[in-house]
Image: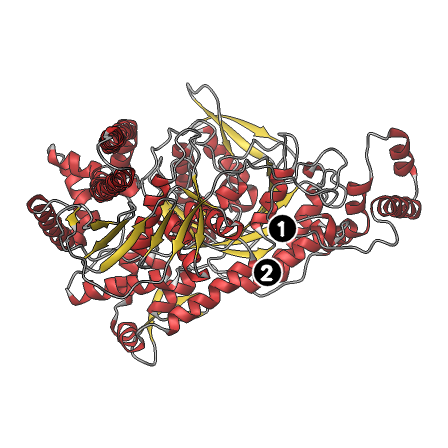
Amino acid sequence: MLMRISGGSEGIRDYLITGRKADRAFSRDELDTRVPLMGDLDFADHVINSMPGEGERYLHITLSFREDEVSTETMSSIMDDFKAFAFSAYDDDEYTCYAEAHLPRRTSYTDAKTGELIERKPHIHIVVPEVNLMTGQQLNPFGRVEHQTGFLEAFQEQTNAKYGLASPKDNRRTELTPASELISRYKGDVFKGVGHEIKTELLDAMLSRNVQTMAAFEGLLSNHGEIRTRNAGKSSEYRNVKLEGAAKGVNLKDYVFSKDFIELPTAEKRERLSREAATHYATAKERRATPAEYAAKVDEWHDRRALEVKYLNSGNRKYYAAYRAAEPDQQKAMLDERKAAFYSRWRPADEPMQEMPRDQGEPIRLQPNERPGQRDATQRRQLRSAHDLTFDEPPEAKTLDGLRKLSDCHEPATPKAIEPLTCQPNSVIERLTGELDEQRKTQSADREQLAKIRRDLDATQLLAQLSHSHGVIPEKYAITKGKDGGDRLQCGSRNLNVSDFLTKELNLPWSSAEAILHECYGRQKGNQTPQNRTQPSRGLWDQFHAERPKLRERRETAWGDQIETEKKRRHAIRVTFLAQRGKVQGDRSQKSAERKAAISVNRMERIAAEQALRGVIAKEREALKADNPTGIEAQYSAWLKQQAETGSTPALDELRRREHYSNKKREDETSHVATLQSESAASPVPYLPFRYEVSRIGEVTYSDHHGSLLRDGHDRISMLRTDDNAVAIGLKLASQKFYNSKHGTVTELTVNGSAEFKRQAVEVAVRDGIRVKFADKEMEAHRLNLEKQKQAARQNVARPPVEQKPTEKQKQPEKQPSKARKPNKGIEL
């Protein structure tokens, strides 16, 4: 495990939920399963946003693992240890701490710049708002982290020993990166960056010439250029070689150029290098004793150093000098005195320690020295007029005679299944609730069919398919047979069947796992044999990377044109409606009730037109996504196709190597799309099929071939049917009918009916993006919560975002969320 500490001011919640960073076209839901281990993310974010000022507001700590699998129980225990260490000098009511583990769903991806494989491992993100909840003052349990390096290193190594985890001290070359992503090393690709060619040449010469002494190594270097020794006599000593004609030398800091490695026998050198280059499944080892020096350092942290960080301020020079000059026993007494004074000031003797209320209300803006619980946050909102959306029991079925047609009554298409608003959990409670829901889904599956798939599915084909879709490296998994005759995949000490591999190794939700099983099994029965994903050609990838700015520009232009045409078509519908309404309002030959009824019909025609346009736009966007992909792999394949069409034989070979197994699939998809286009051309999408009748007082009752739908009254809309589509139409009509164009405010509705109907109205409004507010506070709170979930779960899915050109800062390895300010401190152990 490797621990790193940095800080930021904002954006940590969005980063954890969305997972977006420069030049990586994957969302968090595609990359990881989020497993909350401690605290509540929404509350931590609430505290961060409540802090005044624009400086650093939170600590962001990452714990990265070398192992491919670390159990949730182990990570929870590690978090308990971290909490006891970090907050050794604090009581529970003084701080909040949120932690979540990221378990990879996509175990590797291609680096956009180099084309190399980035392998992903489990890791933990910890967020600590830098405010003492009891005092309102700054909280930083580590102070200046560069002064605590020894203590933090001691905790890190104690944790590694306690849980048998790999230490960065034992993995000098295979480093753990800030995001727990390891660049897979292959023979012939040992080095990266500046000087990689000379380093590769030196290593090859060292092995071929049997170099086993530093003198022989320096003799080898002298054949290449001028030699300098850096940090002579220190443990960090290394050589620098300046080639003839070069502006500066190349630092040989790599472990393979250290004295320890050079003096190994050549056979052992080769064995170590081949072991590191080999792809293997990393697991935790046996627990081991913590080295004495680290154990002593951790004890010192708890006994003295944590208290010094909290209670001593070097700005008070007189007291600080007296403390430094005191004996250890005196120092302990001085710290105890400071501690007693602190709590006597902020927590009187008759005031028991209390948990801070975990409310989700309006953020509290703290003033200096103001405690969060001292005052309630005021909420001042302008009162707006509310209107009724009333639920009436559906009447008995009846035939409506003498009805005028709103449009031709076509048979409506089968309504699309409603996708639930899914979102990964933000707290331990939400996580446990989600786990129970996953168990129910698994138990309700077709057991007989799944048993057949588990028994008959070829694990080799599953791994090959997953290598394309989820970045799985097939070479890491040995395949054996289970007692039922089905394939088993060896994941360390675990032998998993094909379904457990998807849910327990790739951490996928059951709905995704089940779909993959059926898809792969269907291909197997259709004799479609997938090939393992292969690394792209470095030369072709470099050409592709150079042309990516042009591809990005073309994609942005295409999406810009699409958005512009969408606006124009929506505007045309609105202009038509306004013209029709103006004509009706100006016709004084009709009675008031007749004019109101006619305007109601105009509104329904507008809703029908917008509904039809929405379907057309959805198809256009899907086609645009296919022609202008945002995923780096899809972009590379599209670029290869373009190059092959211009006569590039290497590009054609590369394309065939990458796309071998999917030819039949593409033919099927092409035929299917052609059929859809043909049907669309032959039968345009009809407006929604409504009929209506007008009462003597101007109320309009709408119906379709299923029966009565809704009634549009003077000051209310009454639902006569309660299916989701009917409720959606009613909400849209209400949002237009009661819209206050003078003030330009979102329509606020009062909804009457059962609790179930109110819940349905909120969910339908969020699902279809209907711009309304609810006068009922519980309904409005539910709507806001669902909107937040929808944004987190579907961000960048409905329409790929315009790809941002990475800045120089974003091109660097990521240490902070994309929105976070540059940290003013950081530590890497």
Front-most of residues 484 and 80: 80
Q: Give the number of the disc on residue 295.
A: none
Quadrant the C terminus occupies: top right
Is residue 516 shown left or right of residue 822?
left
Please tell me how crowded label 1 is: few (under 14), some (14-19), or many (20+) other residues with Cα within 10 Å. Answer: few
What residue lies at 28% left-to-right and 36% top-to-bottom? 541
Q: How many marks?
A: 2
Q: Position of residue 600 (x, y in %)?
A: 27, 42
**Res 232 visible:** yes
How far apart are the two marked residues, 1 and 2, measured between alpha carbons? 24 Å
Compared with residue 227, is residue 333 higher up or lower down, i.e. above or below?
below
What residue lies at 28% left-to-right and 41% top-to-bottom? 593
Residue at the spot of label 1: 359
Secondary structure state at the residue bearing disc 2: helix
Is residue 762 shown left or right of residue 527?
right
Asked which quadrant contains residue 458, the reply is bottom left
What residue lies at 59% left-to-right and 30% top-to-bottom? 230
What residue lies at 68% left-to-right and 39% top-to-bottom? 145
Front-most of residues 797 and 520: 797
Front-most of residues 759 and 641: 759
Q: Where is residue 242 in the image (x, y as percent from the top left)?
A: 47, 24
Q: What residue type is labelled 1?
A: Asp
Q: Does label 1 or label 2 sit earlier along the sequence? A: 2
Q: Residue furthest bottom?
A: 483
Q: Position of residue 618 (x, y in %)?
A: 24, 43
**Res 183 visible:** no
Secondary structure state at the residue bearing disc 1: loop
Q: Which amino acid does label 2 sit on?
A: Ser
Residue at the spot of label 2: 76
Is residue 398 shown left or right of residue 292?
left
